[in-house]
Image: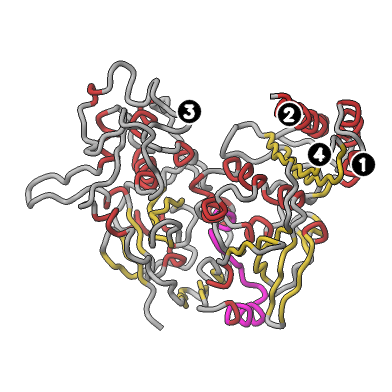
Amino acid sequence: MVAARITVNGKETPISPAAPHTTTLDFLRDRGLTGTKEGCAEGECGACSVLVARPGVNKPTDWVAVNACLVPVAALDGQEIVTSEGLATAGEPGTPPTLHPVQEEMAVRGGSQCGYCTPGFVCSMAAEYYRPDRCAHSDSGAHADSGSDPDSHAGSGSGSGETVDAEHGPNGFDLHALSGNLCRCTGYRPIRDAAFAVGTPSDEDPLAQRREQSPPAPATTEYTQDDSAFLRKSSLAETLRLLRERPDAVVVAGSTDWGVEVNIRSRRADCVVAIDRLSELRELRVEADRIEIGAALTLTEIERRLDGEVPLLAELFPQFASRLIRNGATLGGNLGTGSPIGDSPPVLLALEASVVLADADGEREVPLADYFTGYRQSVRRPGELIRSVRIPLPLSPVVAFHKIAKRRFDDISSVAVAFALDIEDGIVRKARIGLGGVAATPIRSLATEAALEGKPWTAETVEAAARELRGEGTPMSDHRASSLYRSAMLGQSLLKLYAQTTEAVSS
């Protein structure tokens, strides 16, 4: 077995003697790469952002930003990462390095004050800078050299008055790329100006050139230190045999949940098994009667590969945590944790999805409505994995995902409601409603569905069904919301859907 190694800023280095639970953040800082910072240790601030070379959607390789505080460094065995220090180009001996275009724009536009969050912003911004399908909507505000005079943009900055909308710049920059990065100093406008000023990578840019080559192949990993192990097998069959032998093992993909447990609750595991690079779990197929999504595809990969083909998922993705989290999080992980406030289960329930469970003996398909059995409990047996999620076709045409939370983005739901309705000739022929945050498990709103089906899609029907919806589940009071508020939001969400659909028909 080849010793576990990782390539950082072009230089290969052994992972040993780091413990298997060591985060990439701590690994990097222990080696003097202190631009990577710890702010929250749970994936909410982005100060730890780094770039990882991953299989691309439009090119062989994508530069993907992830939270280094969550990912075990052993999970990056054989892979290639770039930190904020690796973005600049080294100069001749005795001369300072040349700033990367995103670093230059952040500097000249005042995007950094105390500087603590800046390296993380720069890495997240660089991932969007190198996104292959990013394209300028106009020539104004986007400069190919990206090292322009900060005064060359008149008045209030490059993005002001020239944006396509509030979250997209004229250079095609999507501000959702920075939704997982927090700054307490600048008020964000200078950072936004810098983002909307970056141009396109030059032909000589080494990181742009790197996108044309395949990313490192997944490594088979057997990394053991101090009686604990981090393991990655080369196939699903080998992994399932391992899990039969080690049913106590912790299974990880993006580590967006397990990383929090390690950092905040100091949890440790004797054996961690990684499934994120298993090819059998990374397929996405659109067939005549269903869409099958591999459990280890990240939400970003699903979003970009489906490209709006499932509108309800398209509504979910921008509201699911942040881009940094979506770059690692998977549907398999979100369902596997069994959390009652996960954002994907209500959507998948409304889509009538099922999960394919696999173990060493074979596979079985379970409707998601039958999957959850209690708080963070499911029908999944020891040694069993979620292999894929199946969504039946055709899809219902009237859909909506309403997430009620204290922050617009990057927050945990107080209530989540997903709707999928078939309305023909003014009659609700079929209604599927998924709820999160109002019971010990994600649930289908069966009583409300029954109150809608076969009825005319009118204010009277909707108001009666909204009263039914307010009584669904067993909402509790906690620091996010009271039970009364949660119940009220359930009913309000259906009224909102009716108002939206009526407005769409009349417009």
Tag nearer the camera, 1 or 4:
1
Q: Residues within 10 Å of mark 2 (few under 14, many from 20)?
A: few
Residue 476 image label: 4
Q: Position of residue 287 (x, y in %)?
A: 65, 64
Residue occupying the point 45% across, 36% down:
175
Q: Is residue 389 above or below residue 423?
A: below
Q: What kind of residue is marked 3? A: Asp
Q: Position of residue 317 (x, y in %)?
A: 59, 45
Q: 314 or 430, which is in the foreground?
A: 430
Q: What kind of residue is marked 4? A: Met
Residue occupying the point 23% across, 23% down:
152
- Label 2 belongs to which residue? 505
Dot 3: element? loop
Residue 256 belongs to the span the image colors magenta: yes
| The residue stretch that appears in magenta | 238-259
Whichever of labels 1 and 2 marks the residue nearer the N terminus, that label is: 1
Dividing the image into 4 quarters, which one contains the C terminus? Answer: top right
Residue 454 image label: 1
Q: Position of residue 264 (x, y in %)?
A: 56, 50
Disc 1/disc 2 C-alpha distance (Å): 20 Å
**Do callouts 1 and 2 mark residues in contact (Cβ within 8 Å)?**
no
Residue 165 image label: 3
